[in-house]
Amino acid sequence: DKHDTVGIDCVAMCVNDIICCGAKPLLFLDYIACGKNVPEKIAAIVAGVAEGCVQAGCVLNGGETAEMPGFYAADEYDLAGFAVGVVDRPKMIDPANVQAGDVILGLPSTGVHSNGYSLVRKVIGVDGMVPGTPEAEAKRAELEVVREDLGGVSLADALLAPTRIYVKPVLELLRGGAPVHALAHITGGGITENLDRALPKNVDALVTRDGDKMGWSVPPVITYISQQAQLAPNEACKTFNMGVGLCIICAPEDEANIVAALENMGERPFRVGTCLEGTGKVVYTDEQ
């Protein structure tokens, strides 16, 4: 029954993809379909969408709400949306520029982001629960207990942490003339099924989490869900972002300047891996 942040996730899934070609998001439109139009709930949803647009620096240009009681249960809704962006064609980011020897940098995620929730719901035992029932209320109380293994937050709060929107730091980096070869938004399918979109057919990405001094760590909530699902890290990376929300590929001689520029913005970039000659695949290893 928390509805004021899911809109941020909806916006993030669109604008974080748009920036991967170097485009600036201009506007966003949403669509809410529900079983019963509860004004307070709809207002909370739209407030989250508006906050996502603020974070992305784009306009919430409009939307639509459809009440469909014959299709949705009274407490159910679907939220959809799309974004429009613009980029000068000569300035578009083209993965064809990626070469063997390039380095892969990452920006940290805030948690699970918007992916893997079918597995999450199964792991935490809420599949099939009817909201408002004694069973559901007991589960809610269990999920809201603050836990030290999750960094002092509840499992509910950790799982509902909104997706990080990377628009402003990326656009500032590009405006500064940073020679970025490619960008990848790590969403459904995890690192292995998203980073390959930023690779040409003759280059592989070798991603290694080995305690890099720049501090790449997997969020505790992802570690917890992976352990409960009995997923080894090399399997979990096919579903979850493993703490990497966005990847930036650049030439090795440009790495220091790009890292410094991001750090000056308050970001915490870290080395994710390197590019090798290959066939366009991603290899993930975890030495922790």
Image: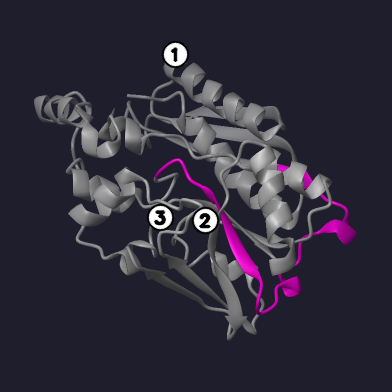
List the residue tagged with mark 3: 242
Does 217 sit above or below residue 133? below
Q: Which residue is at the front of the view, 88 or 82? A: 88
Q: Which residue is at the front of the view, 77 or 223? A: 223
Q: CA separation, marks 1 and 3? A: 35 Å
Disc 3 marks which amino acid? Met
Residue 49 position, x and y percent, is 57, 29
Secondary structure found at label 2: loop
Would residue 151 appear left or right of 17 to someone viewing this image?
Answer: left
Residue at the limit of the structure toward the top, as seen here: 40
For residue 88: magenta?
yes
Residue 272 position, x and y percent, is 52, 62
Disc 2 marks which amino acid? Ile
Q: Residue visible at 21% across and 31% down?
A: 143
Q: Residue visible at 89% across and 61% down?
A: 90
List the residue tagged with mark 2: 186
Q: Quadrant of residue 211?
A: bottom left
Does the rendering let one see residue 218? Answer: yes
Which mark is on residue 247? none
Q: Residue visible at 27% across and 38% down?
A: 150
Q: CA separation, marks 3 and 2? A: 9 Å
Q: Which residue is at the front of the view, 68 or 112? A: 112
Disc 1 marks which amino acid? Glu
List the residue tagged with mark 1: 40
Residue 77 position, x and y percent, is 41, 33
Would residue 180 appear left or right of 268 to someone viewing this image?
Answer: right
